[in-house]
């Protein structure tokens, strides 16, 4: 069974990254993984390098680093690690590049990041760091918004996250096959209900709904190991309509705790296609979305 061994959670000390930390910590506990916390200091005077005084810049940067390190210590004071292997670091450079470089250098298996909401100005902010990491990372990325329903409830140092319902949206591609491995692993670790969803934009004229449903359910359940039903509840569903709308609607109606999507690679065409279903689901989903690359 697939496992996470090294998890990276970038922090900017916002409420959004604090929520992402709850998920990163929970996953690290379940998988007994090492958890890296990274705060990135962007370069000073990057726009006007010729006007920077080296001594002043160095002193200022030392002060900023010291302040960031203190913020990390304060952040962790009220968030017990409870035996986790945890390493916190302050890095310098462009934020996106630093996160991706750190993930590559430390062979990270998962990046967990907060997103900045789904409304107004906050909606646009997703397009900055988190979205760039989602597009370019070589490992899965868990994008964590503020949930629309409360299933994150810390109690006396207990695991703050309990995933009860996991939704895997699949198009039967090789990307979706890889995402299934993660869905099964997470369902087992959290003893969660796992729903497999495939969306048809329309029913073929030669089919009726019952025929289409039977065909899709058969394809959805074919790759599931027989033993999986002994440790999680499995459901198969067919949706009809625009894929991203059906995924978001299903997640809302069932109070899904996690959506998992297989996404395309990192070449030019794949990056353009990223903006179709995956991009919209991440923007509009009422819960965290795990984007799995291959």
Image: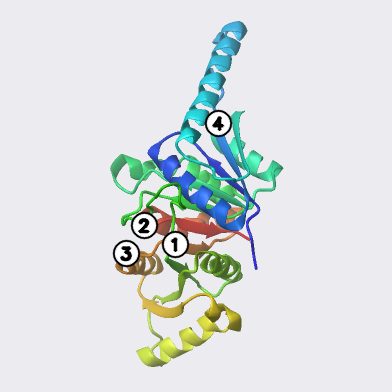
Which numbered marker is on residue 163? Answer: 1
Viewer-nearest of discs 1 and 4: 1
| Residues marked 4 and 3 touching at CB (< 8 Å) | no
Q: Which of the marked residues, 1 or 3, is nearer the chain's N terminus?
A: 1
Name the quadrant of the N terminus: bottom right
Q: Nearer the viewer, residue 51 or 122?
A: 122
Viewer-nearest of discs 4 and 2: 2
Question: How far is the residue under mark 4 from the one under mark 2?
Answer: 30 Å
Which numbered marker is on residue 40? Answer: 4
Disc 2 designates what residue?
151
Name the quadrant of the C terminus: bottom right
* Residue 197 visible somewhere in the drawing: yes
* Residue 12 visible somewhere in the drawing: no
Q: Which of the marked residues, 4 or 2, is nearer the chain's N terminus?
A: 4
Image position of 215 with respect to 188: above or below:
below
Percent position of residue 51, x then y: 55, 9
Disc 3 designates what residue?
252
Q: Nearer the viewer, residue 216 or 47?
A: 216
Question: How far is the residue under mark 1 from the one under mark 4?
Answer: 29 Å
Question: How far is the residue under mark 1 from the one under mark 3?
Answer: 15 Å
Task: Identify the element where label 1 is drawn.
Answer: loop
| Residues marked 3 and 2 touching at CB (< 8 Å) | no
Residue displayed at 68% across by 44% down: 104
Instruction: Tell me if mark 4 has few (under 14), some (14-19) or many (20+) residues whose alpha carbon lies within 10 angstroms of its own.
Output: many
Q: How is the image coloured?
A: rainbow
Image position of 168 with respect to 86: above or below:
below
| Residues marked 2 and 1 touching at CB (< 8 Å) | yes
């Amino acid at each position: 069974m697939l496992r996470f061994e090294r998890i990276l959670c970038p922090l900017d000390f916002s409420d959004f990254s604090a929520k992402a930390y709850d998920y990163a910590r929970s996953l690290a506990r379940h998988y007994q993984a090492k958890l890296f916390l990274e705060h990135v200091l962007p370069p000073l005077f990057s726009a006007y390098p010729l006007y920077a005084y080296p001594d002043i810049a160095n002193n200022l940067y030392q002060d900023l680093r010291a302040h960031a390190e203190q913020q990390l210590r304060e952040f962790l004071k009220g968030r017990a690690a409870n035996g986790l292997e945890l390493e916190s670091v302050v890095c310098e450079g462009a934020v996106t590049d630093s996160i991706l470089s750190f993930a590559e250098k430390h062979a990270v298996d998962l990046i967990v990041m907060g997103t900045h909401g789904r409304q107004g100005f906050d909606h646009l902010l997703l397009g900055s760091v988190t979205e760039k990491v989602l597009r370019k990372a070589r490992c899965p990325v868990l994008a964590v918004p503020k949930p629309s329903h409360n299933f994150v409830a810390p109690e006396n140092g207990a695991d703050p996250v309990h995933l009860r319902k996991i939704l895997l949206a699949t198009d039967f591609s090789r990307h979706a096959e890889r995402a299934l491995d993660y869905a099964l692993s997470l369902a087992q670790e959290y003893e969660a209900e796992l729903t497999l969803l495939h969306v048809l934009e329309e029913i073929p004229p030669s089919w009726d709904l019952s025929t289409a449903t039977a065909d899709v359910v058969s394809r959805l359940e074919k790759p599931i190991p027989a033993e999986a039903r002994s440790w999680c509840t499995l459901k198969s569903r067919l949706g009809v309509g625009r894929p991203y709308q059906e995924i978001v609607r299903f997640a809302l109606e069932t109070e899904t705790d996690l959506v998992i999507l297989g996404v395309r690679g990192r070449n030019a065409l794949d990056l353009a296609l990223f903006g179709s279903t995956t991009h919209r689901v991440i923007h509009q989903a009422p819960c965290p979305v795990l984007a799995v690359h291959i």
